[in-house]
Amino acid sequence: MEVLKMCLFGALGGVLGGMGMGGGTVLIPLLTIFLNFEQKLSQGINLISFIPMAVIALIVHIKNGLVKKESILFIIIPACLFGGVGAVVVKYIENEVLSKIFGYFLLGLAVLQFIGVKKVKKDGKYKN
């Protein structure tokens, strides 16, 4: 039953990640709440599962002409550097504290989403 749940949660995280929402937003709480995984383990699983999702999404977006190729390195290099720094820092943070930080992070994302909701004009086009 646990393996079935893990596969279901992985599929859900993959679909949401491919759609641009960020699968970890759902995957990490699912693993910690329903499978009782430690926060660090859940975040590690999320990071490992993110690699193939990101590669596939990048290929699809490049094929659809949605990526400015000259800007890729300005995103990839800082992301890798800060990801490495985060991996080192998280070693020294307790699971309970990390869970609270992640919870506040999700709350912050929710607030930003509500603030940034796009409104539809009468002609059907979006505006900020």
Image (cartoon, rainbow, N blue to C red):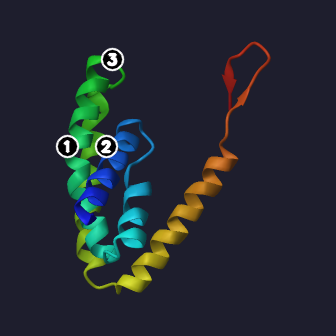
127 or 74: which is nearer to us? 127
Q: Are marks 2 and 1 in contact (CB under 8 Å)?
A: no
- Amino acid type, mark 3: Gly
Q: Where residue 66 sits: x, y (%)?
A: 36, 22
85 or 41: which is nearer to us? 41
Secondary structure state at the residue bearing disc 3: loop
Q: Which residue in the protein does label 2 denote?
A: 75
Q: Residues within 10 Å of mark 3 (few under 14, many from 20)?
A: few
Q: Which callout, 2 or 1, points at the residue further toward the start of the chain? A: 1
Secondary structure state at the residue bearing disc 1: helix
Q: Nearer the viewer, mark 1 or mark 3?
A: 1
Q: Which residue in the protein does label 3 denote?
A: 65
Q: Nearer the viewer, mark 2 or mark 1?
A: 1
> What count of labels does the image hold?
3
Secondary structure state at the residue bearing disc 2: helix
The residue most toward the right is 122
Q: Which residue in the protein does label 1 denote?
A: 52
Q: Which callout, 1 or 3, points at the residue further toward the start of the chain? A: 1
- Amino acid type, mark 1: Pro
3 or 72: which is nearer to us? 3
Q: Residue at x 49, y 78 (%)?
A: 100
Q: Residue at x 36, y 40 (%)?
A: 15
